[in-house]
Image: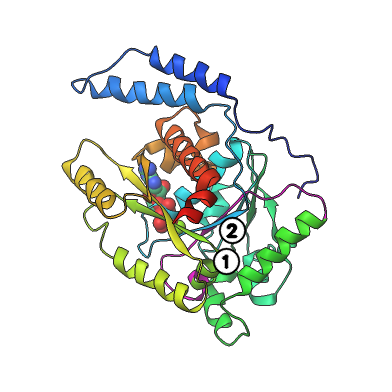
Amino acid sequence: MTTEPNRNPGPTSDDDQRRRAALVASLPSADDDTPLMAALRVDAGRRITLSGRVFPKPPHTRVMTVANQKGGVGKTTTTVNMAAALAKSGLNVLVIDNDPQGNASTALGVEHRAGTPSVYDVLVDGAPMAGTVAPAAGVPNLWCVPATIDLSGAEIELVSMVARETRLRNALHAYLQQRVDNGEPRIDYVLVDCPPSLGLLTVNAFVVADEVMIPIQCEYYALEGLSQLLKSVELIQAHLNPGLHVSTILLTMFDGRTNLAQQVAHEVREHFPAQTLKTTIPRSVRVSEAPSYGQTVLTYDPSSSGALAYLEAASELAERGASASTQEEGE
Ligand code: ADP
Ligand code: MG
């Protein structure tokens, strides 16, 4: 935990944005016949537009659960890379690893051997969250509540407990309040990584959050199971957390060369035009290599197309978040 002053100097100035836009406009144009050139141009544009930029702070702490009942669709990858991209862009970010596999803790370079203070202690023993928060390796302003293997038993241990669905929410609210009381910088984003099932761990993650972010893998069965997920969100809304809503959908592992990926993307955008981010995350070896070095792709290879795509997606998320309160009022 830190008591250092908040270094976020505020959103990037108009002048700076104009200078970056002029640079992007001066890049040579590429046509569809040269896909490699086109891809390089996109990356160059993103590098100019986004590197070193400061994203706007949301009006209040945004708590987002990254969920999808399917495994291997990019939940953990999206959680840690969006979190790192937001933190690199001047925001204070907390990741809660709520999956017993502990993959988010691994990717953030955070200790998570059995017995390490973790989300298990928070959920099952009612331990204060502050004692479990650890700084992520190599990214300032980014923290993680790790998951250890102990969490695999929590699903069963929680069943008989009082307030079993709201334990994570109560702990997070107390932690956020404690930071304010101690004069520490406000957390701007909390991202919760979920296991691929709808048990009490995921229910806790839905109850702690205001928003759900769904990563969708651009492959054949992508949409299968999505209606199940949306039903689960509705159930939680009706009984436990009326404010919960799906705010964000991110298309991941996108390979624009295949018709299938294009079709899936088209279909998702048709059903969820407001929620789906414009940015898609390409399938990229660098993204999948990073966790084995205990890193996100944002630190492992910041100029790779995967890192730049996550930076762009995070920028969209932050820009939408900055104006979300006015949008919601207008709905
Ligand atoms: P989940 O948390 O939904 O189970 P993961 O984030 O662990 O999914 O991703 C599943 C696998 O796919 C991992 O091996 C991960 O490294 C890989 N992966 C995720 N996103 C990408 C990507 N954009 N490009 C290449 N591999 C990816
Ligand atoms: Mg995962």
Foreground disc of the pair 2, 1: 1
Give the residue displayed 49% in from the left and 65% down from the top: 244
The picture quadrant where one finds residue 116 is bottom right
Q: Measured from the top left, where is residue 305 in percent x and y?
A: 40, 31
Determine whether the residue tagged by mark 2 lies in a helix, strand or loop.
strand
**Is residue 294 something one can see in this rendering?**
no
- Mark 2 crowdedness (10 Å alpha carbons): few <14, some 14-19, many ≥20: many
Disc 2 residue lies near ligand 2 with CB under 8 A: no
Q: Which residue is mark 1?
A: 208
Give the residue displayed 69% in from the left and 56% down from the top: 133
The answer to whether marks 2 and 1 mark residues whose Cβ atoms lie closer than 8 Å is yes
- Mark 1 crowdedness (10 Å alpha carbons): few <14, some 14-19, many ≥20: many
201 magenta-colored: yes
Q: Which residue is mark 2?
A: 96
Give the residue displayed 57% in from the left and 70% down from the top: 151
73 magenta-colored: no
Q: Measured from the top left, where is residue 85 in percent x and y?
A: 54, 39
**Is residue 297 something one can see in this rendering?**
yes
Q: Is residue 156 above or below residue 2?
A: below
Give the residue displayed 52% in from the left and 42% down from the top: 318
Q: Main secondary structure of the magenta part?
A: loop
Determine whether the residue tagged by mark 1 lies in a helix, strand or loop.
helix
Q: Measured from the top left, where is residue 160 in percent x and y?
A: 58, 88
Over which residues does the magenta segment extend? 182-202
Q: Is residue 3 left or right of residue 217?
A: right
